[in-house]
């Protein structure tokens, strides 16, 4: 089968890319395009060319495996095909169905015109893999749309729906029968002898651009793009498109592309990309296990999490019943949902129509009988085993026989909850993160008796909801929170020994986390953290800090009381000498002599225990593989994706360093802080995490 079909249609030839599953621009496709273009150009009977894709999609981009290998691609590369297109004297029209993404869109941008299906989407998502579009994408896109739209679209990597692409000038027309319309359009152009429109020569929207545009945009994305390479190089490249001569700007784009391609950030982001794919594979749940169809959902508990979870389903177009014990609690929950949607409408990120559609899918109820038709019921009531058991007893009474019974618990024993029902094979944890309608991670937790179909269903649910699902085993804290205990505790020990909250959060934020551990505590509430801490039975020999308790006793609960590890003016945190006094008092009380602690020590003492516990989690089979932990931390805990996740990061830096840190900490911190046996083994043998498999 050729990777590009050559299909004459009268005096027009359709070059149809045919490379399942997504028409990636592999070498065979590139060769097929080059040959097809050459043949069509040479045939005098051919007056125009349409480039299209088979199976309802144009082309989803470069071959990811080629990018992953980081190699320089074999000729013809996309840039050579584009040059060939722009040198062809016959009109070339792209017919975009499905998706034209990355290299796929870059190819379409080198055609003279673009017709898109109404439901198609286009975009340059290279930034998500740490790259910039390297085949003229930043140049041609900018010339068609002007810099503002290009900056937004290419630094975010967003997929633009076809109507938006038309508005911006990326495509020239929308149609239902795209290929047919592209052929007719091409004929019209020939008849009218219309001059060919070469995007790389279009200049109206890049002429007289105010350089301030770029300075302002740099300032705007600083908080999000700090520490990363690709977004900045994208801005540089778009600026070059507007400010430099064409040839120089194209050359700069290539240089920036090469710089990004060769950077460790690109490697880390590609690792995360593959890790997310891999996480969906569960060895004892073969791909042929059919997930249950989820057509109706119920969520029980209309609090912070229940409301957010209900929104996730409504956003995916699935009707959801939301139950709370009293009318007041329910109304409060529904009110919060409405407010949340309204804020998105006010911000312009949601239309009023979409808000109304979503709200019409959420039905508030107070009677369990209303849940009889749900295919899955998700419990999100208080984190109290007794309360949850009572709620599950109600499920037992009303739920349809096929229904899955899920709990959003952050740490309770899934088996203990399952034991209250007669169908433990239907019971599973679906651990959403706050805010549930925003955070991408879905940590699914299997109990001892959870069935393969139940697991397959909640994993598939991740995809339906646009989330990244990871499967965890049942233990205190599952993957994410179990590791976090050590990170959180160590932050307090560092305070006792001489560090300040600003220093600790500063180190972690410079590393790339959105927020440091103490700022996070203040956000979640120190009372909440203290309660969780108290409920954990730590071994008697383990080091513990009284700091959190002291803060709570003094009413320093965090942002909600205006003071915690910091003082707050609105949401702005300010270092507070009172806290430092409190911390110094604790140091004195414990007989610890405060000392200067350097940033490197802070980073290692916070992150190495995280990795160490991660190794135990892999060894116990709680996580199926080390890379699942990276997926959890990148999508649920703010670990910078461009550093690949904690396990990847530690492997790159050398696992022996983690072992050394843990050997240093264990004598003062207790047995749980000893190096994990798996880690010691892998470090000694020089193997990475692959050795754990
Ligand atoms: P919340 O206090 O905001 O909401 C709990 C809701 O459950 C309240 O509306 C309450 O009226 C309702 N409720 C209590 N008992 C009930 C019952 N018997 N029947 C029906 N409704 C009942 O709590 P939350 O923060 O949304 O947490 C809910 C669950 O999600 C907990 O298990 C928690 O551990 C977990 N969780 C919370 C977060 C978070 O960041 N808040 C993150 C992940 C998981």
Image (cartoon, rainbow, N blue to C red):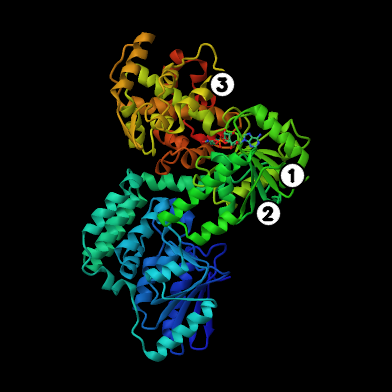
Residue 320 on image: x %, y %: 64, 50
- Whether residue 517 is situated above or below residue 354 in the rendered picture: above
Q: Horizontally, is 223 left or right of 346 in the view?
A: left
Q: Horizontally, is 615 left or right of 297 in the view?
A: left
Q: Residue at x 66, y 32 (%)?
A: 388
Residue 266 on image: x %, y %: 39, 48
In primary-sequence order, the first of circles 3 and 2 is 2
- Mark 1–mark 2 Cα distance, whole angstroms, equals 18 Å
Label 1 residue near ligand 1, CB within 8 Å: no
Q: Which residue is mark 3?
A: 535
- Mark 1–mark 3 Cα distance, whole angstroms, equals 34 Å
Image quarter for ligand 1: top right
Contact? badges 1 and 2 (CB < 8 Å): no
Question: Could you say which quadrant of the image residue 124 lies in?
Answer: bottom left
Quarter of the figure with the N terminus: bottom right
- Total labels drawn: 3
Residue 295 numbered mark, or none? 2
Residue 295 on image: x %, y %: 68, 54
Whether residue 421 is visible = yes
In primary-sequence order, the first of circles 1 and 3 is 1
Could you classify mark 3 by the number of other residues whose Cα lies within 10 Å: few (under 14), some (14-19), or many (20 or more)?
few
């Amino acid at each position: 089968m050729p990777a590009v079909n050559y299909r004459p249609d009268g005096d027009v030839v359709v070059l149809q890319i045919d490379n399942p599953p997504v028409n990636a621009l592999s070498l065979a496709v590139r060769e097929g395009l080059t040959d097809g273009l050459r043949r069509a150009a040479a045939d005098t009977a051919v007056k125009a060319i349409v480039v299209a894709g088979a199976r309802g999609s144009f082309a989803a981009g470069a071959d990811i495996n080629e990018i992953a290998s980081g190699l320089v691609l074999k000729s013809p590369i996309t840039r050579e095909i584009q040059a060939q297109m722009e040198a062809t004297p016959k009109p070339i029209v792209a017919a975009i169905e499905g998706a034209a993404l990355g290299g796929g869109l870059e190819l379409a941008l080198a055609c003279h015109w673009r017709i898109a299906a109404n439901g198609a989407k286009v975009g340059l998502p290279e930034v998500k893999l740490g790259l910039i579009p390297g085949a003229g994408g930043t140049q041609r896109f900018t010339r068609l749309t002007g810099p503002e739209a290009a900056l937004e679209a290419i630094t975010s990597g967003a997929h633009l729906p076809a109507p938006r692409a038309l508005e911006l000038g990326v495509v020239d027309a929308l149609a239902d029968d795209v290929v047919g319309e592209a052929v007719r359009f091409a004929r019209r152009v020939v008849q009218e002898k219309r001059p060919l429109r070469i995007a790389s020569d279009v200049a109206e929207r890049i002429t007289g651009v105010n350089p301030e545009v770029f300075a302002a945009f740099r300032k705007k994305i600083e908080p999000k793009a700090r520490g990363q390479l690709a977004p900045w190089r994208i801005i540089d490249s778009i600026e070059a498109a507007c400010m430099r001569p064409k040839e120089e700007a194209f050359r700069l784009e290539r240089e920036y592309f090469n710089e990004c391609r060769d950077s460790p950030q690109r490697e880390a982001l590609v690792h995360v990309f593959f890790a997310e794919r891999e996480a969906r594979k569960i060895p004892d749940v073969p791909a042929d296990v059919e997930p249950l169809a989820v057509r109706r959902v119920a969520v029980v508990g209309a609090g912070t999490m229940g409301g957010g979870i209900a929104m996730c389903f409504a956003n995916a177009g699935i009707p959801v019943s939301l139950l709370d014990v009293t009318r007041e609690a329910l109304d409060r929950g529904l009110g919060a949902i409405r407010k949340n949607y309204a804020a998105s409408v006010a911000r312009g990120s949601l239309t009023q129509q979409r808000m109304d559609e979503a709200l019409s899918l959420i039905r508030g109820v107070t009677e369990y009988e209303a849940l009889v038709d749900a295919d899955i019921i998700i419990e999100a009531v208080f984190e109290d085993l007794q309360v949850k058991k009572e709620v599950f007893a109600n499920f037992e009474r009303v739920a349809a026989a096929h229904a899955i019974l899920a709990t959003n618990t952050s740490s309770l024993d899934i088996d203990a909850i399952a034991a209250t029902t007669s169908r433990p094979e239907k019971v599973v944890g679906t651990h959403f993160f706050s805010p549930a309608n925003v955070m991408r991670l879905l940590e699914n937790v299997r109990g001892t008796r959870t069935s393969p179909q139940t697991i397959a269903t909640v994993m598939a649910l991740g995809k339906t909801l646009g989330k990244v699902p990871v499967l965890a085993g049942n233990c205190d804290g599952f993957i994410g929170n179990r590791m976090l205990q050590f990170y959180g505790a160590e932050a307090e020990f560092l305070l006792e020994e001489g560090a300040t909250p600003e220093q600790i959060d500063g180190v972690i934020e410079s590393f790339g986390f959105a927020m440091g551990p103490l700022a996070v505590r203040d956000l979640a509430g120190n009372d909440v953290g203290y309660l969780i801490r108290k409920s954990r039975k730590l071994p008697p020999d383990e080091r513990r800090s009284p700091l959190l308790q002291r803060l709570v006793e003094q009413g320093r609960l965090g942002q909600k009381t205006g003071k915690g590890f910091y003082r707050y003016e609105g949401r702005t945190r300010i270092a507070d000498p009172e806290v430092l006094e409190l911390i110094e008092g604790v140091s004195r009380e414990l007989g610890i002599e405060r000392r200067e602690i350097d940033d490197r020590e802070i980073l290692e003492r916070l992150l190495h225990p995280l990795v160490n516990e991660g190794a135990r989690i892999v060894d116990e089979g709680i996580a199926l593989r080390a890379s699942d932990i990276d997926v959890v931390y990148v999508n649920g805990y703010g670990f910078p994706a461009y550093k690949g996740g904690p396990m990847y990061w530690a492997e790159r830096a050398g696992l022996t360093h983690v072992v050394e840190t843990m050997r240093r900490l264990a004598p003062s911190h207790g047995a749980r802080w000893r190096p994990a046996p798996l880690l010691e083994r892998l470090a000694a043998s020089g193997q990475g995490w692959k050795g754990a498999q």
